[in-house]
Amino acid sequence: MLNEYDPFNAYKQTTLDARVAAANPHEMVRMLLDGLLEEVQRSSGFMERRSFEDKGKSINKCLNIIHGLDSMLDLENGGEVATTLNRLYDYCSRQLVTASVENSIEALTPVIKVITDVRAGWANLN
């Protein structure tokens, strides 16, 4: 278990805070997508180790990130892209809940695929 008072973790958090503060909205979405993929991998590891409490916390982090991504969408003016992303984020949320309830690593696979594809599309917007 990570010690939240570990100086290295404090340094990492400070570095992340600085990156977030300097990020434009495009970079913020990229960072959230990257963070989501990392957290889904952690969830998978917790499932594999049958660490149910950590898995629950990790899945909640994933859901919070997806909620954050979804809340950034402009559904009124974003057209088909915003609507499609909204549907994909909803699908990923439901899939994460299913994976958690069933403790199914396999149920995480479609989430990884969708978010990886969204991330690739987002990277091409540069």
Image (spheres, helix red, strand yellow):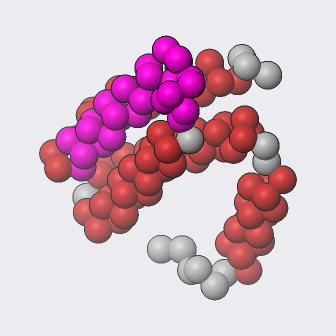
Extreme residue toward the bottom, this view? 5
Q: Is residue 104 left or right of residue 113?
A: left
- Position of 11 relative to 98 (above/below): below
Residue 100 appears at what percent x and percent y? 24, 49
Choose top left, top right, bottom left or bottom right for residue 12: bottom right
85 part of magenta stretch: yes
| Number of numbered discs visible in the structure rendering | 0
Q: Residue furthest left?
A: 102
- Say whether residue 88 is magenta: yes
* Quadrant occupied by the C terminus: top right
Give the prevailing secondary structure in the magenta stretch: helix
> Which residue sits at x=56%, y=25%?
77
Q: Left or right: 11 with respect to 49?
A: right
Near-viewer residue (111 or 93): 93
Q: Which residues are magenta?
A: 73-100
Q: Tell me the quarter of the picture where residue 32 sits.
A: top right
Give residue 39's position: percent from left, percent from top. 48, 49
Left or right of residue 106: residue 75: right
For the question of whether residue 105 can be seen, the reply is no
Residue 64 at least partly seen? yes
Is 116 drawn above or below residue 56 in the view shown? above
Q: Residue at x 64, y 39 (%)?
A: 29
Which residue does the image show at 29% across and 68% down from the upper left? Answer: 53
Pick out the residue farthest to the front.
76
Residue at position x 74%, y 55% in the image: 20
Q: Where does the image place residue 42, in percent across and percent down from the top left? A: 45, 51
Instruction: Out of 45 and 27, give the one closest to the viewer.
Output: 27
Looking at the image, residue 115 lies above or below residue 101: above
Percent across and percent down for residue 76 are: 50, 28
